[in-house]
Image (spheres, grey):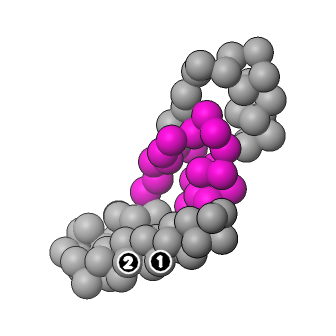
């Protein structure tokens, strides 16, 4: 649909509208979306890959979640 630039542009005429994007979000780009004022959260399957779920690989899923939290914390520190 146009990525972060589209939602950033939507913020001008629709400042009260919030979005939770889910398509095409992954561990390498989710912070690009979260930097937008009108995106309070994102959804994505990168945290629970189908093969990890099928194998009940909770350790891998935990590592993906921990890595995501680490990136969010680093982002928060930079924005202070």
**Residue projecting furthest to the top:** 13
The part of the chain drawn in magenta is 22-45
* Residue 70 placement (x, y as % from top left): 47, 77
Nearer to the camera, 76 or 35: 76
The count of marks equals: 2
Relative to 64, 29 lies left or right: right
Q: Which residue is identified by label 1?
A: 70
> Would you place residue 69 above or below residue 15 in this image?
below
Magenta residues: mostly which secondary structure? Answer: loop
Nearer to the camera, 63 or 17: 17
| Image quarter (top left, top right, bottom left or bottom right) of the C terminus | bottom right
> Would you place residue 11 above or below residue 75 in this image?
above
Is 37 covered by the magenta stretch?
Answer: yes
Is 31 covered by the magenta stretch?
Answer: yes
> Would you place residue 2 above or below residue 53 in this image?
above
**Residue 64 visible within the image:** no
Tell me what residue is drawn at x 76 percent, y 15 percent.
13
| Image quarter (top left, top right, bottom left or bottom right) of the N terminus | top right
Label 1 vs label 2: CA separation? 6 Å
Marks 1/2 in contact by CB < 8 Å: the verdict is yes
Relative to 76, 5 lies left or right: right
Tell me what residue is drawn at x 51 percent, y 67 percent.
72
Residue 9, quarter of picture: top right
* Residue 78 placement (x, y as % from top left): 66, 71
**Residue projecting furthest to the front:** 80
Residue 76, quarter of picture: bottom right
Nearer to the camera, 79 or 59: 79
User: Is disc 2 surrounded by few (<14), some (14 to 19) or many (20+) residues within 10 Å?
Assistant: few
Q: Which residue is identified by label 2?
A: 66
What secondary structure is marked by label 1? helix
């Amino acid at each position: 649909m146009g990525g972060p630039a589209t939602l950033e542009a939507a913020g001008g005429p629709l400042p009260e509208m919030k979005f939770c994007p889910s398509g095409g979000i992954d561990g390498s780009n989710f912070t690009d979306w979260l930097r937008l004022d009108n995106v309070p959260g994102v959804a994505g399957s990168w945290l629970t890959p189908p093969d990890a779920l099928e194998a009940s690989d909770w350790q891998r899923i935990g590592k993906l979640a921990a890595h995501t939290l680490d990136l969010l914390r680093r982002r928060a520190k930079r924005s202070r």
